[in-house]
Amino acid sequence: GDSVTQMEGPVTLSEEAFLTINCTYTATGYPSLFWYVQYPGEGLQLLLKATKADDKGSNKGFEATYRKETTSFHLEKGSVQVSDSAVYFCALSSYNTDKLIFGTGTRLQVFP
Amino acid sequence: SQTIHQWPATLVQPVGSPLSLECTVEGTSNPNLYWYRQAAGRGLQLLFYSVGIGQISSEVPQNLSASRPQDRQFILSSKKLLLSDSGFYLCATTGTARSNTEAFFGQGTRLTVV
C-alpha cells in the first residue's frame, strides 16, 4: 500500500546551517506530496506542497521538489532559524482514493 | 473557509468503557474526513477516512470503529477501551473531495485510558 518514510530525528542544527530532511514515498498512480509543520503547542499546518512530478513547493524559505524517478520529496532550507524548531511531517495524498498518509515526523531543533 | 470542531479536548476513561469522539466540519460540503492518532515516535497514524456519508475505510485493524451519519459529521467509537487506546486523536478534512488540497485539523482529543 501507499506509504511515506522520512528520516528519524531529532535533527539538531546551529542557526544559519543548511537543513535537509529526507522523505521518500511509495504509491500507485500520481500522488500529491506535502510537508506539514507542527510548532510547539500548536496544531499541524501546511508548509508546502507539490502536485505533479518536477513541481517545486516553497514557503518561508523552505523548498521541496517532487522527484518521481527517485520517489522523493526532500525538504531543504538554506539557513535555519531558531524559530524553525518544530516537528516536520511529510505526507502524500493518493490520487484515486484521497487517502492522506503522513510520515512519522522529524523533530528539528535549532540552537543559537 | 472551513473549520473543524472536535470534542472533548481531554478525556479520561476506565478500561472496558465505551468511547465516542465527535468531529464536525463547517464551511464545506461533501468533505473528505480523516481520523488520526498521534503518538510519540510514530507520527500520525491514519485510522479511518471517509469520502462520503456511510463510506468508511479502515486502515488499522483495532479496537476502534468510525461512522459518518451526516455529511459533515465523523464519529470515532469503541465498545470497550483498552489501555493501548490511549493517545492523541486528531480529526482532519481536506474539504470537498480533492486529493491535492490542504488538510485542516481539529484541536485534538487527549484520551487517557486508566
Image (cartoon, rainbow, N blue to C red):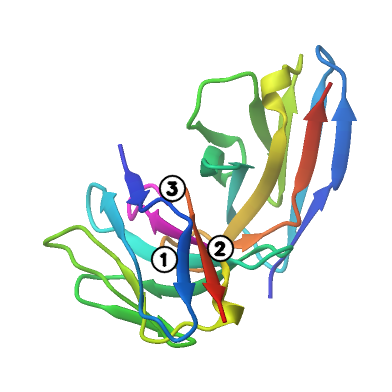
Task: Determine the residue located farthest toward the left in the rendered image.
Answer: A69
Q: In what element is the residue under mark 1?
A: strand
- Asked if the residues shown at circle 1 and circle 2 are in contact, with their CB atoms under 8 angstroms apart, the answer is yes
Q: Amino acid at mark 3?
A: Lys
The residue where tag 1 is placed is: A34
Q: In what element is the residue under mark 2?
A: loop
Q: Is residue A100 above or below residue B37?
A: below
Q: In what element is the residue under mark 3?
A: loop
* Rendered location of residue B9, percent (x, y): 85, 48
Residue at left offset 43%, top offset 50%: A103
* Rendered location of residue B88, percent (x, y): 70, 42
Which mark lies nearer to you, 1 or 2?
Answer: 1
Left or right: A99 in relation to A56? right
User: What is the magenta range?
Assistant: A87-99
Pick the front one: A47 or B56: A47
Q: Amino acid at mark 2?
A: Ala
Residue at left offset 76%, top offset 18%: B81
Q: Quadrant of residue B99?
A: bottom left
Q: Are marks 2 and 3 on the same chain?
A: no
Q: Which mark is residue A99?
A: 3
Q: Residues within 10 Å of mark 2 (few under 14, many from 20)?
A: many
Q: Quadrant of the N terminus of chain A?
A: top left
Residue at left offset 68%, top offset 76%: B1
Q: CA distance from mark 2 to mark 3?
A: 11 Å
Q: First in sequence, mark 3 or 1: give its number.
A: 1
